[in-house]
Image (cartoon, grey):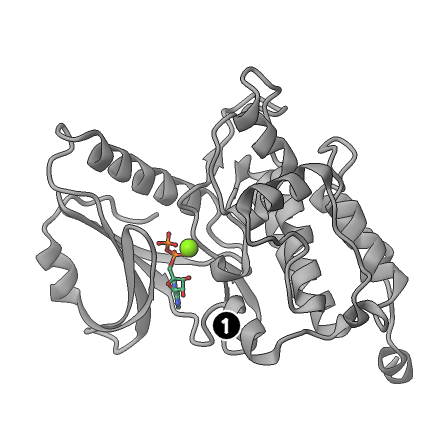
Amino acid sequence: DLPDRTEEATEFYAKYTAKEILGKGASSVVRLCVEKSTGREFAVKVIDVGGDHSGPEESKEAYEAAMKEIQALRALAGQPNIIELHDVFRSPAFIFLVFELCRKGELFDYLNNVVTVSEKRTRIIMGQLLVAVQFIHSRNVIHRDLKPENILLDDQLNIKVTDFGFAAMIPEGLQGDCLFDLCGTPGYLAPEVLKVSMYDGQRPYGKAVDLWACGVIMYTLLAGYPPFWHRKQMVMLRQIMEGKFDFSAPEWNDVTEVSKDLIRKLLTVDPDSRLTADAALQHEFFQIKTHLDLLVT
Ligand code: ADP
Ligand code: MG
């Protein structure tokens, strides 16, 4: 178990040397850091939680969000495709989360460099992603912000799901959908999340939102552009709610029907008809043997 300390930021700087910035978010900076006693490299996410938690609502919220992020990470420890939390330090103004380092950075940058990903590589990435999501859901956590910026790659190009800043923990004994709040990233939002925000008193949403995001990611891997996009955000949000996307661009000519079938079953508007992580992993897309595999075995 990780130590639960409330100490000054100096405690972190006594143990680690902070180096260059690896990434930035709305209220956090992630830096490379070196553990002084071992020379091992890590990534530290420094979250600004403000000073006074009895004071302004925002800083209290930031503090509670960081606590929830830690709680989710602890509940998910040990799964190889989920980022490992190595150490935690808390001071009144900052929370330091020390993570295993992913040298190859974000899947987002990898995608921008290679533009599109082969079906074979997509099978590996999506297989690992869905195994991670299956595990996350089995622990009654919902990630709610799956996207290529929050999927990191290690030296062997294995994926590590990170950023549990929006994660929801489903209360023990509550099986079904129970969430109402609007959070996440516009292009990856599931239709049922948008519907909650548009009409008051709509039905709650749940785990299926992560599978929708997996569908958006899989489409983007194979096409090099996202399934729902319009320069006017309202138009894009309407496309999402109607599940309006297609495979008409020339990029899709050489993509197999099996891949398209899995994408369609993930980008299904009705969350009850959408594949679960378990069902997605049973899809034919993951049963395919390539010619090379057949030659080897
Ligand atoms: P935020 O909640 O602010 O979005 P993230 O946890 O997503 O913070 O981290 C922001 C960025 O920092 C990531 O998108 C990535 O580029 C980089 N980053 C985060 N964790 C690591 C890590 N363990 N190794 C390498 N880079 C990381
Ligand atoms: Mg992030």
Residue 124 in view (yes/no): no
The x and y percentages for residue 85 are: 37, 56
Identify which residue is drawn at 54% across, 51% down.
146
Lateral position of residue 253 relative to residue 104, left or right: right
The x and y percentages for residue 110 are: 54, 74
Using the image as rendered, state which of residue 104 and residue 235 is in the foreground.
235
Identify which residue is drawn at 46% across, 56% down.
162
| 69 relative to 203, above or below | below
Q: Which residue is mark 1?
A: 109
Lateral position of residue 72 relative to residue 80, left or right: left
Ligand 1 contact, mark 1 (Cβ < 8 Å): yes
Identify which residue is drawn at 31% across, 49% down.
2
Occupied quadrant, residue 140: top right
The x and y percentages for residue 209 are: 61, 39
Mark 1 nearby-residue class (10 Å; few <14, some 14–19, many ≥20) = some
| 208 relative to 98, above or below | above
The x and y percentages for residue 159 are: 56, 65
Which quarter of the rendered picture does the C terminus lie within? bottom right
